Structures are given as structure tokens and as C-alpha cells.
Amino acid sequence: MNKRLIVSALTVTLGLTAAVGLAQTSGIKKGLKITMLPKFINNPYFTTTDNGGLEAIKEFGGVGKAVGPSDGGASSQVSYINTLIAQRQDAIVLAANDANALVPSLKRAMAQGIKVVTFDSDVAPEGRQIFINQAKSDGIAKGQIELMSKLMGGKGEFAILSATPNATNQNAWIAIMQEELKKPAYKDMKLVKIAYGNDDDQKSFTEMQGLLQAYPNLKGVISPTTVGISAAARYLSTSPKKGKVMLTGLGTPNQMRSFIKDGTVTAFQLWNPSDLGYLAAYTAGSLASGMITGKEGDTFTAGKLGKYTVGKNGEVVLGPPTTFDKANIDKFNF
């Protein structure tokens, strides 16, 4: 064998050894079939979470896909879950449209050995192994009230423009916001209305219009949903109330950039949705590989995001949200 062939063979051997070493380090089985199931498709937020999940699945050698309904109804998600059961997926990673309605289907999935990871919006704990929380619910809720208070000068009427009435994450945040408002620091703030845009752009736009008409003294609106805040900002941007009614909530930088720059919105918050999907997919891969079971204290490594620990009730927290404003919004692209 000549020197060139020896060098080539050595290079191939070293490459294969390195690849095997990486596979052994990750510990995740190759070829796992994992599906991302968002609340509904064609939503920029969930497109980003799904892409983050698919990136992770590709990284650890799985077979990934993203499917979902075109509406936010629980029955639509049930149909997809049943199909995924029939397709014998190794794991389902979903953002739930309802805390309880999906549980029977998810229990059937788990009974057949399919691992279930929820993210963004949880189901009842008996319907999944692990929930990936974008941030602690109290941290999100308290952060939103604190930011709203700052924008309103600590006093006045404000409203909440939520997603669907059954959205578990939204309802948890709103309940904590209502408790937070009982503190002396917020005694001059009054929540006058909780409206629902059903995570639909036009419905959210119309609800924002209705809030401004029904409450002439309104000083602020919190919309903790990416569809709601962008639709509300679009209405506010051409309204005489622009600059007078403070709008904040949870949105993506790419959605909200123009509204920040034209003064419609001063500041809003969110986590990185791509990282949320990425973490959820790595969690699913770790579960399906038998590396973790979802019990409190389980630890695993989620690729570039590093090490995570499962907390109480099977919860894993991505991390604290970021506040976006004119000073930093151009540093982000999602």
C-alpha cells in the first residue's frame, strides 16, 4: 500500500472514530422518529419552535417532521395525535391547545411506548412525561406586570388580550398577574378586561379595536401571545391612541421590529422560541433513548444549550425571558 492510500485510510478511520465518539457522547439512539406538533401551523412563533426542534433532531441523527392543524382547536390536535400513534412515532413533541382534552389520546400514545414532551403550553401531567417551560410562569407574569407598570407610570386602567380561553400557559400567567396586582406597588393599576383573540390575527385585531373603543381611559394592554401582540400593534400603529396607550406582551423581534422603531411599542418580552423547540426535541430524544424517565432530578445534555435538570412535576425550564426595546432589538433575528 502506498503512502497516499495509507494516509487516506487513516483519515477515514479517524473520521469514523470521531463520529462514533460523538454518537456515544450524546447517548441518543440514531434513527428515532420524532414529530413536532405545534398548536397550529403558519404561525411565525411555532414555525420557529419547529425549526429549532428539527435542527436538534437532525443533529442527533433522528428522523424529524413538523405537522399540525390550521386552527387552534383541541379536536384538531387529537386527530393528529391519533395519526402519529398509528405511524408508530418514537416521540411526540407538542404545544397543547387544551390542558385536558388531549390527555386520553396522549395516554394511548404513552401506553404504546411513545414518549410525550409538551412545550410552550402544557397538558395535565398524566398526559406527558416532561413539560418544557419557556420560563417560570411566575417570572413571566410578574415580569409582564412590572413592565406594564413601568410603561404606564404605575397607574391607570389596562386590559389583557389573551389567546384562547383554554390556553393553559395564558391562563396560568393571567392568574398570577391578578395575584400580583394585589400588591401595594400596583394599587393604582386596574385590570378592566380580559379579551380573547383566539390566536387569530384578524380576531385579535378586532378585539384590540374593541378595547380602545370600550375603555376611553385605557392606558395599557398586555398581550402575552405572539399573534395577539402583533395584531394589536398593527391596529394601534394607525390609531389616534398610538403613543397614548402602552402595548406590551410576548412577541418575536422580527414581528415587532417595525412597531418598536415607529414608536407604537416601547418594549416587550420573549424567550428564544428556536431554543425552546431545540430543547424540547433533545428532551424527547433523551426520553426515547432511555437516558431519562422524567422523574425529578434526571439530568441530560441538550446539545449547544448544555445541561438541564428535570424539576418537580416533570418540568424543565429553558430560562428567563428577554426584554426587547430600541436599544437591543436589532441584535436578534427570529
Image: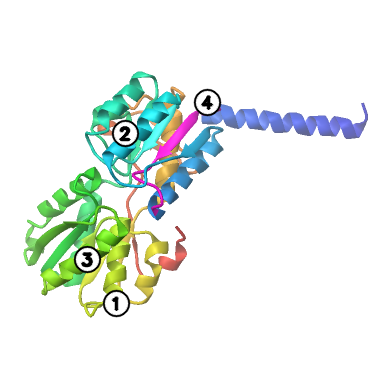
Contact check, label 4 and label 1, Cβ < 8 Å:
no
User: SS class of the residue under badge 2?
Assistant: helix
For the residues marked 4 and 1, what is the alpha-carbon distance in whole angstroms?
53 Å
Q: Is 280 positioned to the left or the right of 161 in the image?
A: right
Q: Which residue is mark 4?
A: 29
Q: Mark 1 or mark 2: name the one nearer the start of the chain.
A: 2
Q: Is residue 25 above or below residue 136?
A: above
The kind of residue on which mark 1 rests is Thr
Q: Residues within 10 Å of mark 3 (few under 14, many from 20)?
A: many
Name the residue at 32% across, 44% down.
120
Residue farthest to the bottom? Answer: 240
The magenta region covers 27-43
Q: Position of residue 142 (x, y in %)?
A: 20, 55
Q: Nearer the viewer, mark 4 or mark 3?
A: 3
User: SS class of the residue under badge 3?
Assistant: helix
Q: Nearer the viewer, mark 4 or mark 1?
A: 1
Label for residue 78? 2
Name the residue at 30% across, 46% down.
72
Q: Position of residue 266 (x, y in %)?
A: 30, 71
Asked if residue 89 is among those painted magenta in the image, a careful observer would answer no
Label for residue 208? 3
Q: Is residue 257 above or below residue 25?
A: below
Residue farthest to the right? Answer: 2
Q: Which residue is mark 1?
A: 238
Q: Nearer the viewer, mark 1 or mark 2?
A: 2
